[in-house]
Amino acid sequence: MRYSFTIGALVSSVFATRPFLNEPDTGLLDKIGYNFPVGSLPELEDMVGLPDFEWAARNYLPIVNYTYYRNGAAGEWSYRNNLEVYQRYRFKPRMMVDISGIKSTLPTTILGHNFSAPFYISPCAKAAYGHPDAELNLVKGANAGGILYIPSRYSSLKMETIAEAAAPDQTLFAQLKLSNDDVASKKLFTRAEAAGYKAIVWTVDAPGGSSRQRAQRFDVGASDEFTVQTWDKLQQYRNWTSLPIGLKGIQSVADARLAVDHGVPFIILSNHGGRNLDGSPSPLEVALEIHETDPSIFQEIEVLADGGVRYGTDALKLLALGVKAVGIGRPFMFSNVYGQEGVEKVIDIMKTEIAGDAANIGVADLKSINPDYVKWQPNFWYT
Ligand SMILES: Cc1cc2nc3c(=O)[nH]c(=O)nc-3n(C[C@H](O)[C@H](O)[C@H](O)COP(=O)(O)O)c2cc1C
Ligand SMILES: *[C@@H]1O[C@H](CO)[C@@H](O)[C@H](O)[C@H]1NC(C)=O
Ligand SMILES: *[C@@H]1O[C@H](CO)[C@@H](O)[C@H](O)[C@H]1NC(C)=O
Ligand SMILES: *[C@@H]1O[C@H](CO)[C@@H](O)[C@H](O)[C@H]1NC(C)=O
């Protein structure tokens, strides 16, 4: 009896599902107290990692505001996978490397524009849900930190207002979600160009809307419009603007290759943070498939990626495959509850983590990171 009980316990512990951790426990509550009052905001100095900002926003914001940012599509399997997938792959750290210059190698270019680091603020709608100054904190924070900001088409503030708050030499790309109304779409291209945006990011990953159950409960779900998004449409849009048009939401090697064939200058591997199609792949999985089956895509066009990036190590795994820069969405929206200072703190944390982690895996120059620094065989024991 005892024998079978032991075997049973062993088997069930092997197959036991490890609970999903939206915000890994790194001692935030040990510091600020388990009775920290709901509705209050912890001190900014207590935010030491990106997930801390989600705890702070969840505790501080009205539930509707928090839920709008937090939600994922349907059962949120893709949302969770976006966060967990990075832990399926381990580094192959190299020692005895002179890494003294690593910090100076963080700067990079995106479409020829200079930035201080290979990460950017992904387009997320409705910054007013986090702070009364809304997107102004994001545009100013991005400038202070020297990184790219891509305001959302559905920002709380008008694209002109955001552009006016930018520094004279600051580079912004405009994200557009285009409807079937060509007259309205044409106006958006004209406005983005006139306001000084340097590129268009056309989001193509939700032609059929999405089932956002968590958000629907609070009346902040998504639209269910069906939109025509085709390569012919891209040709038509190119006639309307002199700005480069990139595609956000590429989720297969085949479409990445088609983007190259159509002369698209950059693509963003993204499943919209798991907010649109449940069952869609994480950007890391798509980048890995490109690496395995058609790796020259990474040289032929600029490949960016976003989804679930919360640590320097997550960014490094994407960069190792050939991704030029990684986007971060929710953590910036959550950091906005602290205003511009919060946005800047996220940028600082990411820079520190990327430089330190790159040094720890033996990368002397971030530009020389490559797939050999990661074991691309998934480890399922801890997923
Ligand atoms: C609250 C919220 C609003 C978003 N709005 C847009 C949008 O208007 N356009 C867009 O292309 N992507 C939008 N996204 C997706 C982000 O650009 C990005 O793909 C995603 O947030 C990355 O995942 P992460 O949040 O795990 O970093 C939104 C994401 C969030 C969380
Ligand atoms: C971008 O950086 C390069 C290398 O540091 C420099 O030569 C170039 O002038 C910079 N471009 C702009 C527009 O600042
Ligand atoms: C919650 O969102 C509403 C609507 O945008 C906004 O008016 C309110 O200020 C937000 N609450 C906080 C604490 O930011
Ligand atoms: C682009 O514009 C040219 C010249 O006006 C026109 O001939 C062509 O049909 C247009 N292409 C598309 C796809 O609209």
Image (spheres, helix red, strand yellow):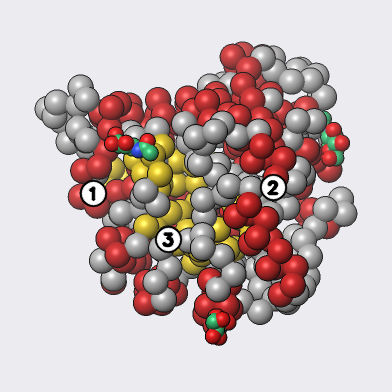
Kind of residue sitting beneath label 2: Met
Image x and y of residue 289, in percent: 35, 66
Instruction: Give the mark, 2 or 1, whose residue is nearer the N terminus.
Output: 2
Q: What residue is rendered at 65% in x and 60% in y? A: 190
Residue 197 in view of the camera: yes
Distance (Cα) linking label 2 and label 1: 37 Å
Of 311 and 144, the residue lying toward us: 144
Q: Residue at label 1? A: 370
The residue beneath circle 3 is 266
Secondary structure type for disc 3: strand
Q: Amino acid at mark 1?
A: Asn
Packing grade of label 1 (10 A; few <14, some 14-19, many >=20) is some
Residue 251 shown left or right of residue 195 in the figure = left
Dot 2 or dot 3, earlier in sequence: 2
**Mark 1 residue's CB less than 8 Å from ligand 2:** no
| Residue pictured at 49% horizontal, 34% vertical | 169
Dot 1: what SS?
loop
- Kind of residue at badge 3: Phe
Q: Which is more toward the observer, 159 or 370?
A: 159
The earlier-in-sequence mark between 3 and 1 is 3
Residue for badge 2? 159
Q: Nearer the viewer, residue 175 or 317?
A: 175
Whole-percent x, y for residue 90 in the image: 31, 45
- Mark pair 3, 1: CA separation: 20 Å
In the figure, 37 relative to 71: above or below?
above
Across and down, in percent, residue 303 comes to 39, 58
- Up/down of 264 relative to 353, above or below: below
